[in-house]
Amino acid sequence: MEEKFAISIYVCNKPGVLVRLTQTFTRRGYNIDSLVVSPAHDVAFSRITVVVQGEPSSYDQILRQLNKLVDVVHATSHESADVVDREMALFKVRVDPNQRAEIFQIVEVFRAKTVDITDESLVIETTGDSLKIDALEKLLGPMGLVEMVRSGKLIMKRGIEET
Amino acid sequence: MNGAQIVVEVLKKQGVEYIFGYPGGACMPIFDALVDAPELKMILVRHEQGATHMADGYSRATGKTGVVLVTSGPGATNTVTGILTAHMDSVPLVILTGQTITPNLGKDAFQEADVFGVTMPVVKHSYLVRDVKDLSRVVKEAFHLASTGRPGPVLVDLPKDVVSADWDEDFTAEIDLPGYKVQTSGSSKDIKIISELLAKSKRPLLYVGAGAVISGAAKQVLKLAEKLQAPVTTTLLGKGAFSEHHPLSVGMLGMHGTAYANKTVVDCDLIMAIGARWDDRITGKVSEFCKDATKIHIDIDPAEFGKIIQPDISVNGDAATVLDELIPQVKRLDTKEWLKQIETWKKKHPLKYPKRGGLRAQHVLAELDRLTGSNAIISTDVGQHQMWAAQFCKSTRERQWLSSGGAGTMGYGFPAAIGAQLGKPEEVVVAVVGDGGFQMTMSELATAAINKLPLKILIINNRYLGMVRQWQQLFFDNRESGVDMEGNPDFVKIGEAYGIKGFHLRRAGDVTKVLKKALAYNDGPCIIEAEVVKADNVFPMIPAGAAVSEMLIDEPPASKKLKKPVGST
């Protein structure tokens, strides 16, 4: 059975590093669910959070292969209890002005925000863990959901230690 | 100075002797800079694949980093097979490729190829240099990365405008690789655990691979084996890490290893991998491999731990360093019974071949081994002759055996021998090649001839792609398909066309005479074309994907139908 894994990777900000990482996953048959790359506090480095899906039996070895890449400073797997994980999503919903109220209720319960409004549509923004976003998607689905964009998972270790 | 002169200066500082190269538009500035650096000897090859194999052979024979210089586009893509070969066998190479000017990158410029992208999966690391200011550091880093830790090929792509640009370089830039870590010594706790596991073993086996050769650990392996009184098996690429003439040696293991090595593998209660990676040619069916034996794994590359075999204990470090730490902690084991058992296997199942019925490759190779005192550098191609050479040409010291193991690259043997002979001019170098593989890179005859290299090219000519034919015979109902080398030239005449001496060898009775003549000929390269029986097979053999215990020691009767190999090729 395939499983999902979240990995945070600290890399030198050098050309080609992302290709080398993704090649490692592809070669071992891992699918990338989400990938977030951003500059680290020190601009010579980047932080990557990647959620992958694949066979648990080869997971440790993939981590070692990632760590072996010359431009990877460290690649770490995290247990969900040790980290804060967040994702942001935008939802576009087709909605007539007279049906907005029902959607606003959902937005409020989820502590989401309405960030764009027209005669025929709403854009809703939300932040939270991936389960919350999944739940919101499920509710908005039958109510005229036109499109959805998710940022991909961000991970930060709890406490003073670096991720 | 310009970028090209900077590159050349760094090569000089790195102590480079030879550059194996082929010019073209994009790397002309570097070739121009080489005119003023006569200490860097440029070996002009006839095909870029030959250049990478020569650099590889030079490196395997000497332990130094091999250097390749080629142009952009097709020049660079022609090196890919050689880079893969080096990558699979952990050979340190620095490959410098010319590239179109930076403003043209990504615009399908003449002779543009995204070589940085093309080679990414087969290099240890690679660079595309966009600024002349980075050149000196990058080339320095390339040598550092290629030669340290688990070695490998490093490619540096050099746009023509970057190597043409002027820059006042002071060569003080330090390497800057915050993500690159090499662990050399093992953890003392783990080493203690290993010594305890060893102490409990009654039937130990040391399984020694290329990592021990690269580390220069032959002395330590010998000391450990003798102190423990443990048998030693070497992999195809580990040949030379332990003398195959030593009484504790059981020779090579695996698909075409000796019967007694494989029996030792099946019956051991502890197997310790020293710089070896449990390749599928060795384990066969992984779930059956040494099922009940304790497994210990010493490797400089932690990504090897658990990749194929889950070891009971692993130590990340350099083989020689780890063994130096381990040796004082081990005691002589009571292996008398075990060694006696192995001795019985050796007597019962020696390597053998039919003495009648024409000229046999095994006979030629065994005689070559005898006449050279197991002391020549042997460089092989890939196929039956490679396995026979591995069986019958004994290795006694490190860096004496050059063969494409991981990649199995046909066309490797001859150019690799050229590189080895350049690096080791005083030694006897023999390229043992098949008629198939030799024709893939025989254009390098010119390179061998003009450099007057005294290497011997022993062509085992059975007019077949013999290993494929053997599989077709055994597993595909003898339906031959695409294996007949009809149209082979007279290789001695081919040699003559280059001014190279040649010897025909057709009769078993002439083997000693002809080999002696060839070995005594030192005015340049020579060819020995051994026209051997057509349809000989390599045994012992473990069919791919079968358990080691399913080894076929001898040719099975034609009536016995074998299962088609599963899993690996």
Image (cartoon, coloured by chain):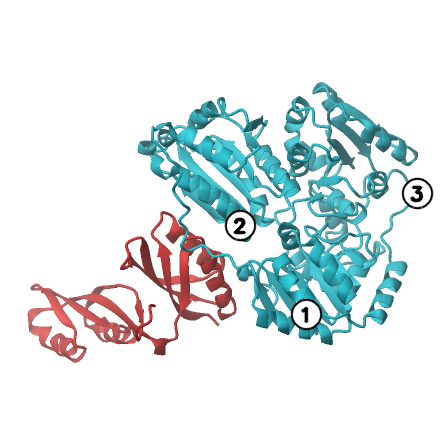
Chain colours: A red, B cyan
Element on which disc 1 rests: helix
Q: Amino acid at mark 2?
A: Thr
Element on which disc 3 rests: loop
Mark in front: 2 vs 1? 1
Element on which disc 2 rests: loop
Residue labelled with disc 1:
B329
Position of A5 compared to B560: left or right? left
Task: Find the distance from the CA under tag 2 to the CA under tag 1.
Answer: 27 Å
Crowd band around label 1 with a 10 angstrom C-alpha radius: few (<14), some (14–19), many (20+)? some
Residue labelled with disc 2:
B148
From this view, report whether residue B535 is shown above or below residue A50.
above
Q: Amino acid at mark 1?
A: Gln
Is residue B227 visible to the viewer in this orientation of the structure? yes
In the image, residue B189 lies at what x, y percent? Answer: 58, 72
Is residue B118 visible to the viewer in this orientation of the structure? no
- Pointer 3 with pointer 2, Cβ within 8 A: no
- Pointer 2 with pointer 1, Cβ within 8 A: no
Residue labelled with disc 3:
B356
In the image, residue A154 lies at what x, y percent? Answer: 29, 67
